Image (cartoon, rainbow, N blue to C red):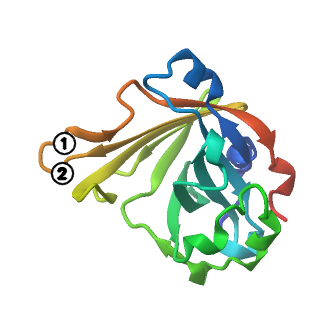
Amino acid sequence: MESTSSPELLQMARWLAGDFSNQEQAWENPPFFASIRVAYRPLPTAVLGGIGFYVEQAYSGHLEEPYRQAVVELTQVGDGIVIRNYRPLQPQRWRGCARGRAEQLSQLSAADLAYLPGCDVQVKRQGSLFVGVTEPGCRCCVVRNGQTTYLQTTLHLSENEFCSHDRGMDPVTHRQVWGAVAGPFRFRKVVDWQAELLQ
């Protein structure tokens, strides 16, 4: 899983490395946005052979109980960047490692992960932003409340802000089934971990 670290890839990785909060957005519009924290903790280079992150997403009052755990890998493909998504095979083993037990992530290996086909996010630099969308094909399947949907993700990343909009779409009607209806979540970086990159 070797990846070439171009200047743009490194820039995106630096901006992504951190703990983000949408507290301001949640205060402004509580009916539509819960207060959420999302952490992108840099992984040791040996885990994926390049730039990777362990990701935890949790409600602000329950950081020890993340409702989403993932591993993402940043790779250069042509003139763009691809975010490859993986699912930890034993999520309970890594729970809490994004913030409190990051040293345990050195034990993580590619064998502990399942790649999620169809879920790559294709990213391009647009001015001062990195802008990404789920790869075409509607193949990133997510079962939510017994219903099969496909995930459609959009993201905007700047130096201090990360905006993401995850929506579950009906594979037949292509209408939204789950996800925020009031637009993307706006996260501000509250902890910076870029010093841990490429270690």
Relative vertical location of residue 93 with respect to residue 7 in this rendering, above or below? below
Any part of residue 23 in sight: yes
Q: Residue 66, how many percent across, how many down? A: 58, 55
Q: In which quarter of the image is the N terminus?
A: bottom right
Q: In which quarter of the image is the C terminus?
A: bottom right
Q: Which mark is residue 139?
A: none
Q: In which quarter of the image is residue 129?
A: top right
Residue that extends furthest to the top in the rendered view of this protein: 28
2 and 1 marks in contact (CB < 8 Å): yes
Q: Residue 180, how many percent across, how many down? A: 39, 33
Element assignment for label 2: loop
Mark 2: amino acid: Pro
Q: In the shown orientation, is residue 51 left or right of residue 26?
A: right
Residue that extends furthest to the front in the rendered view of this protein: 61
Relative vertical location of residue 55 with respect to residue 189 in this rendering, above or below? below
Q: In which quarter of the image is residue 111?
A: bottom right
Q: Nearer the viewer, residue 144 or 167?
A: 144
Could you give the CA–CA distance between mark 2 and mark 1, rounded to whole angstroms?
5 Å
Q: In the shown orientation, is residue 174 left or right of residue 103?
A: left
Residue that badge 2 annotates: 171
Element assignment for label 1: loop
Residue at position x 81%, y 62% in the image: 198
Any part of residue 137 in sight: no
Mark 1: amino acid: His
Q: Residue 82, how many percent across, how many down? A: 53, 54
Residue at position x 69%, y 61% in the image: 96
Residue at position x 59%, y 20% in the image: 27
Badge 1: how crowded within 10 Å, few (<14), some, or many (20+)? few
Q: Residue 174 carries which label?
A: 1
Residue at position x 52%, y 45% in the image: 123
